[in-house]
Amino acid sequence: MKILLVEDSKFLRVAAERALTTAGHEVISAGDGDQALIMAREQAPALILLDVMLPKMSGPDVLKALKKDPATTAIPVMMLTSLSEKNAKLFEKDGASSFFAKSDSMLGKGPDSLLAAVERMVKK
């Protein structure tokens, strides 16, 4: 499955890319919101993993733009954040398919929980 990973932290982006690629996914990456919108339109990924805190354009603004664009509106988006899970309901209202707390996996426990979250989204 082709996944667009949108993460401005090079360390987290490389770690997530490696884990997803090892699990058999094709990964394309963007480091900011503007680049994410362009790549989503051009590459038509099956899933977007979208960081909340991004340069140039915030994750929530990218999410809103993706959901307004007929070319990208159907692509499921998983929001990646180190912010409180209280934000999850807001992201869902804006069109996110799911929410993932980066602190749970990408930082300490390894990539397994991120991979599990991606697999749950694939099964939906």
Image: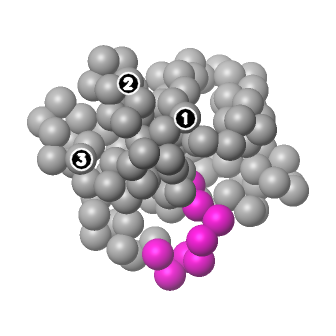
Relative depth, front residue between 76 and 81: 81
Q: Nearer the viewer, mark 1 or mark 2?
A: 1
Q: Residues within 10 Å of mark 2 (few under 14, many from 20)?
A: some
Q: How many numbered dots are placed on residues in this image?
A: 3
Where is residue 60? Give x, y as percent.
37, 59
- Horizontal side of 68 relative to 115 (left or right) equals left
For the residue labelled by badge 1, is the local secondary structure a helix, a strand or a loop? loop
Which residue in the protein does label 2 denote?
39
Instruction: Read off the magenta span.
Output: 80-87
Relative depth, front residue between 73 and 54: 54
For marks 1 and 3, the one nearer the N-term is 1
For marks 3 and 2, the one nearer the N-term is 2
Which residue in the protein does label 1 denote?
31
Q: Which residue is found at the position 75% from the left and 62% from the top?
A: 104
Q: Residues within 10 Å of mark 1 (few under 14, many from 20)?
A: some
Instruction: Answer whether residue 86 is magenta in the image.
Output: yes
Numbered tag placed on residue 115 in the rendering:
none
Where is residue 74? Give x, y as percent.
23, 40
Which residue in the protein does label 3 denote?
65
Instruction: Answer whether residue 99 is magenta in the image.
Output: no
For the residue labelled by badge 3, is the local secondary structure a helix, a strand or a loop? helix
Q: Are marks 3 and 2 in contact (CB under 8 Å)?
A: no
For the residue labelled by badge 2, is the local secondary structure a helix, a strand or a loop? helix
Q: Which residue is found at the position 16% from the left and 39% from the top?
A: 69
